[in-house]
């Protein structure tokens, strides 16, 4: 390995507890990359030469999967991407096939299907190598590395990230370098190596700006905010999350905007900034409603319920929880509905 080896990584998709605040907000781990994040990574046009009804249907299914993933229907998204993959394979459309494997790999990882995730991403990487698509190799190596890191394959992940960085440097891809340094920063952060993580993030931020990639920049700003927050440095944490909120909002980068708001609220609640927390949570809800994204609206309502419960405002907490229950029911999310019902019962006992 040409840089450094790091130990066990564990950052699953969870309801992240806000330190000392007695409440929680749903946060996506940076290493548990979503299909939305993959879409930010892969700037690949699906219409690359193959024509006809089958190609149009494959492209439609690929986009449908992305929309379903944004709405929180990951299982439905997987089905759409699997159908798209079959069509791309029948068309011998290798770039389309690679893209479908990329979406499927990260979706499988989020669903806990780690073996399928690794297989799909290795296939994506193999196609990129066969096609001598060096930029595609950078993205595939990073995606595969993040999945392996999540499984505890730290040495393998570090090797893949460094290979991706070498390729990105050789082809002078600032975006690929930004992504690779960001991956290395995440790996260091997961081990508590704050200085190494900050070094990698600082380079990633500079490369993202050089690449004129506001989405990559916002992602790294969020990661720096999370790094400072984990160290208890809430002032600097809020500074970077605040930059990410503004940048993501300007560029309509909703996943990064949601994540930045969640990070800001966590830091503000810990330091007693309740009024600004409420404003941000309401902003989060408004964006989710504007997008007609039921999953993010559910998360926002739940967070508002927890916020009002923390403040002792039982009527408003009950109202938000009830609204969240209705959305969970519409989404057929029985697990979340049950959790929210328990919160309501608990409130009635107070």
Image (tube, helix red, strand yellow):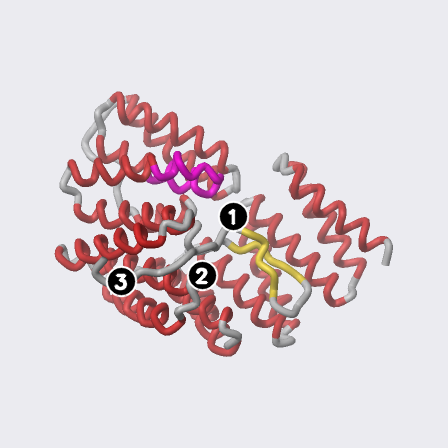
Q: Work out whether mark 2 precedes mark 3 in sequence or the reverse, and give the earlier one.
A: 3
Identify the mark at residue 249; answer none if there is no mark: 2
**Most common secondary structure along the magenta stretch:** helix
42 versus 80 height, above or below: below
Q: Is residue 110 magenta?
A: yes
Pointer 1 residue: 291
Identify the mark at residue 282; answer none if there is no mark: none
Q: Position of residue 86 (x, y in %)?
A: 32, 24
Q: Work out whether mark 1 precedes mark 3 in sequence or the reverse, and give the earlier one.
A: 3
Distance from Cα at disc 1 to Cα at disc 3: 25 Å
71 versus 176 height, above or below: above
Distance from Cα at disc 2 to Cα at disc 1: 13 Å
Which one is nearer the viewer's eye here, 6 or 265? 6
Q: Work out whether mark 2 precedes mark 1 in sequence or the reverse, and give the earlier one.
A: 2
Quadrant where the C terminus sits is bottom right
Kind of element beneath mark 3: loop
Pointer 3 residue: 212
């Amino acid at each position: 390995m040409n840089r450094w080896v790091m130990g066990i990584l564990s950052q699953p998709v969870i309801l992240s507890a806000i330190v000392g605040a007695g409440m929680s907000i749903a946060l996506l781990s940076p290493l548990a990359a979503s299909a939305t994040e993959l879409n930010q990574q892969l700037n690949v046009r699906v219409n690359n030469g193959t024509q006809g009804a089958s190609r149009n249907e494959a492209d439609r299914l690929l986009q449908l999967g992305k929309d379903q993933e944004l709405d929180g229907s990951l299982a439905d998204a997987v089905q759409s991407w699997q159908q798209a993959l079959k069509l791309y394979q029948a068309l011998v459309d290798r770039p389309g096939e690679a893209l479908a494997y990329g979406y499927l790999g990260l979706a499988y990882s989020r669903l806990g299907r780690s073996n399928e995730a690794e297989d799909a991403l290795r296939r994506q990487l193999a196609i990129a190598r066969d096609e001598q698509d060096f930029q595609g190799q950078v993205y595939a190596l990073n995606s595969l590395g993040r999945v392996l890191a999540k499984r505890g394959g730290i040495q393998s992940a570090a090797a893949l990230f460094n290979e991706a960085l070498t390729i990105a440097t050789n082809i002078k891809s600032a975006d690929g370098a930004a992504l690779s340094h960001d991956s290395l920063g995440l790996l260091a952060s997961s081990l508590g190596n704050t200085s190494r993580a900050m070094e990698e993030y600082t380079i990633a931020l500079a490369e993202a700006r050089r690449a004129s990639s506001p989405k990559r920049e916002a992602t790294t700003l969020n990661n720096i905010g999370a790094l400072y927050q984990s160290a208890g440095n809430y002032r600097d944490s809020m500074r970077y999350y605040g930059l990410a909120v503004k940048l993501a909002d300007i560029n309509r980068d909703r996943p990064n905007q949601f994540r930045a708001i969640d990070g800001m609220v966590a830091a503000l609640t810990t330091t007693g900034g309740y009024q600004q927390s409420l404003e941000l949570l309401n902003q989060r809800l408004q964006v989710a409603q504007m997008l007609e994204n039921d999953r993010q609206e559910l998360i926002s309502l739940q967070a508002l319920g927890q916020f009002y419960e923390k403040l002792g405002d039982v009527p408003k907490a009950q109202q938000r929880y009830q609204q969240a229950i209705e959305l969970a029911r519409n989404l057929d999310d029985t697990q979340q509905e049950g959790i929210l019902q328990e919160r309501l019962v608990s409130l009635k006992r107070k």
